[in-house]
Image (spheres, grey):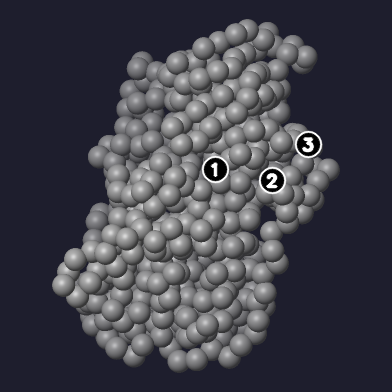
Amino acid sequence: MTTPTVPRLQLARITKRYPSVVANDGVSLAVRSGEIHAVLGENGAGKSTLMKVIYGAVAPDEGSMEWDGRAVHVRNPQEARALGISMVFQHFSLFDTLTVAENVWLGLAKSLTLQQVTRSIEAKAREYGLDVDPARPVHTLSVGEMQRVEIIRALLTNPQLLILDEPTSVLTPQAVDKLFVVLRKIAAEGCSILYISHKLHEIRELCSACTVMRGGKVTGECDPRQESNASLSRMMIGAEPPLLEHHARQPGEVMLGVRGLRLLRDDPFGVDLDDVNLEVRAGEVVGIAGVSGNGQSELLRALSGEDRRAQSSMVQLAGKSAGNHGPAHRRHLGLHFVPEERLGRGAVPSLSLAQNLMLTRTDAIGRSGWIDMKALQQQAADIIARFNVRAGGPHAAAKSLSGGNLQKFIVGREIDAAPRVLIVSQPTWGVDVGAAAQIRGEILELRDGGCAVLVVSEELEELFEVCDRLHVIAKGRLSPSVDRARASVQQVGEWMSGLWTGAGVQHV
């Protein structure tokens, strides 16, 4: 039995080298029984690599690991789970062609039947307030829904150490509060929790210990309850993030208009869009809040041109009907789009950053159709420098970047195109506070330059920081817009359940 003086997990001098970077450089870390321990650091600091070492998904080059005071060598996730270690990855490890229940079943005891696993998922989903349908194929889920599956799968193993990587990025404020109650209860029963989040207020509220990493090394340890957001930022990135300047201005003409958009779901587990009406004017940022899986992906496909089933007049770009036109034609009209899925949709994993530019940019293609490779490389290098992307240069494969750094590159690619209309989904998901402040600042700079910006995000703090007006989407319906200054987090959280009729908020 573990004594209070022996850590549940003890890491000593963990080092992991890759060809272009030392991801972990002599990292030591101790997590005690029942402790909720934060690991804080900017994108590329080595947090995810360290968690994968603990979980057995990555083998360290040097260093040692002790579990309940005895030396262990965790060679794979199966051995980690046998010890009592579970992990929710930032990039999910789910099989697209299997159902939710089948995916969860793979990681549980072989003695359990699929029916038993299904009932367990339904029970855990009710207990934690996480809406998950065990019968749905994973390929029909949104990113947020996939994260819920990963959280439930981890909790079903009754772990002794639970590793959570950005677990609240797709939850409403009310659901975050409920999750924190659950995590505190689990910790009180003796489970240790390693918690990675870029939301500093969450770390201060939830965690009792914090290890700070920078450039692959541990640079500090603290009790986050005794720190401020500013002091944690200084420990993490060496400075406080710049304050955003949100200048009041009169918006111009309607650049993106949606009129009575109705679309039936195109798969059995999708959401019908029901009479969606939306306007985004030049020089304003409009936000759409909502719990993942309420029609965001269907709406974004209709706006980006991936779904062309809408009547032409239902989507207007700069006054021109575009509802039945594809993405290329809409880019010609000035619309650029950042999807929430980084790898596989926002970028081709195996292609270089320079090559990935050509997914949405044609600047380096001459009239003859030849690609100016030198210009393409320079363009990628400029974006890498402007958005402080930590990568091995324009030739680096997209899959070699950390999630946050790839997000910075993809957002930078579309902002650098100087769009007339920018639609961006989850702009700072998994991005550290410094990079998030930069991306939000770039969005506001675009707005001040006359761009019409639509931001779809489950980060309410983000929406309140950058938006002029807010909508909420629930069950395929879009609420009236409300001025940001008149809205509240509590009110928007209630609207996420579809309760906006007669809510008493002045609409604009």
Residue at the spot 56% in from the left edge and 82% down from the top edge? 448
- Residue nearest the viewer, comparing 331 with 131: 331
Residue at the spot 50% in from the left edge and 36% down from the top edge? 21
Dividing the picture into quadrants, the one containing residue 392 is top left
Q: CA distance from mark 2 to mark 3?
A: 12 Å
Are there few (<14), some (14-19), or many (20+) residues within 10 Å of tag 2?
many
Are there few (<14), some (14-19), or many (20+) residues within 10 Å of tag 3?
some
Task: Give the vertical position of 1 relative to 260 (above or below).
Answer: above
Marker disc for residue 236: 2
Residue type (three-letter) at the residue carrying disc 3:
Cys
> Going by the picture, which residue comes out furthest to the front?
374
Dividing the picture into quadrants, the one containing residue 106 is top left
Residue type (three-letter) at the residue carrying disc 2:
Met
Q: Nearer the viewer, mark 3 or mark 1?
A: 1
Residue at the spot 78% in from the left edge and 36% down from the top edge? 222
Task: Give the vertical position of 402 relative to 56 (above or below).
Answer: below
State the image coordinates of residue 230 (x, y, percent, origin top left).
77, 54
Task: Give the vertical position of 172 relative to 310 (above or below).
Answer: above
> Going by the picture, which residue comes out furthest to the right?
226
Q: Secondary structure at mark 1?
A: loop
Label 1: which residue?
44
In the picture, which quadrant includes the N terminus? Answer: top right
Residue at the spot 34% in from the left edge and 90% down from the top edge? 319
Q: Secondary structure at mark 2?
A: helix
Q: Secondary structure at mark 3?
A: strand
Label 3: which residue?
222
Q: CA distance from mark 3 to mark 1?
A: 21 Å
